[in-house]
Amino acid sequence: MNKIMTLTDAQPDNAKAGKAPTLPDAQTVTSVQHWTDSLFSFRVTRPASLRFRSGEFVMIGLLKDDGRPLLRAYSIASPNWDDELEFYSIKVADGPLTSRLQHIEPGDQIILRPKPVGTLVHDALLPGKRLYMFSTGTGIAPFASLVRDPETFDKFDQVILTHTCRDVADLAYGRELIEGLTNDPLIGEMVEGKLLYYPTTTREHSPRMGRITTHLRDGTLARELGLPPISAETDRAMVCGSMGLNTDMKQILEEAGLSEGANSEPAEYVVEKAFVG
Ligand code: A2P
């Protein structure tokens, strides 16, 4: 019932024979990591012609059994210098795409439309001293790309990544990413002393609890990180999370005097909804 075939299903002869996919825009899964019952990340081959700016998203998906593609927007979580593409996704039991996508394995194929777009890009921000990245849930994905991009640290003296989730286990992808950066030969030296990581949980107990919006309003974040209040003169911000986070953060940033930027008109902050599969 409403079964979605992977391209492997649709192209059994080619796939079994290990031949190149015959459908356009097919990419091969190279690894899958399950973080929790509801979160996983995966890597796929990168089309040779695909150029993107760190922070952008593309449409990816699978074939339905009627042969039509079922696609959703996914932020690219890998940096633009990576040979492969990485994605970070929730698993929704009755989600049309993620109920199937969560079962992909290395060697399977997915569809990837090579047309990257998005507003969480350096081009949409004016130069500044500090870059704040505010995320909830899978909204950390575009920032996983940006914190691995040397351009981020060329452009800003300090980069603050906040990640708020309900439970401690939901922070694992971000925590491992940040830990890995320090050992990364390309980025390690660049991020040292410049990248501040600020995880919080809202339901399960953890050393730092509460919504990031509360930590901003009551001054906890500034106090804990030893930073001045956010100001339009020195600070830039990118926001990616639930609608609630995006709306509340817009208000906080506007009150601090920052205005919203776009690719066509860079300004002090940018916002994008975290996509759900
Ligand atoms: P909370 O548990 O207080 O709702 P979700 O899983 O619903 O997408 O939420 C992910 C995280 O985002 C949760 O920790 C949630 O906190 C937080 N969150 C939801 N809405 C907002 C908001 N308006 N401002 C800040 N954080 C929010």
Image: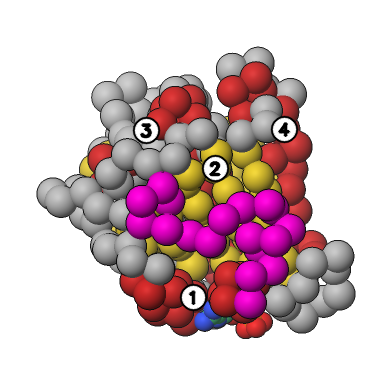
Circle 2: is it few (<14), some (14-19), or many (20+) Cα within 10 Å? Answer: many
Closer to viewer: mark 3 or mark 4: 4
Residue 272's x, y, as percent? 36, 63
Question: Which residue is under mark 2?
Answer: 159
Name the quadrant where ligand 1 sits: bottom right
What type is the residue that disc 4 sits on? Gly
* Pointer 1 residue: 245
Circle nearer the N terminus (4, 1): 4
Of 103 and 187, nearer the camera is 187
Q: Main secondary structure of the magenta part?
A: loop
Position of 54 relative to 35 (above/below): above
- The quadrant holding residue 198 is bottom right
| Amino acid bearing label 2 | Val
- Front position among marks 4 and 1: 1
Horizontal relation, residue 92 to residue 82: left or right: right
In terms of sequence position, does the residue under pointer 1 or pointer 3 come before the other?
3
Q: Identity of the amino acid at label 1?
A: Leu
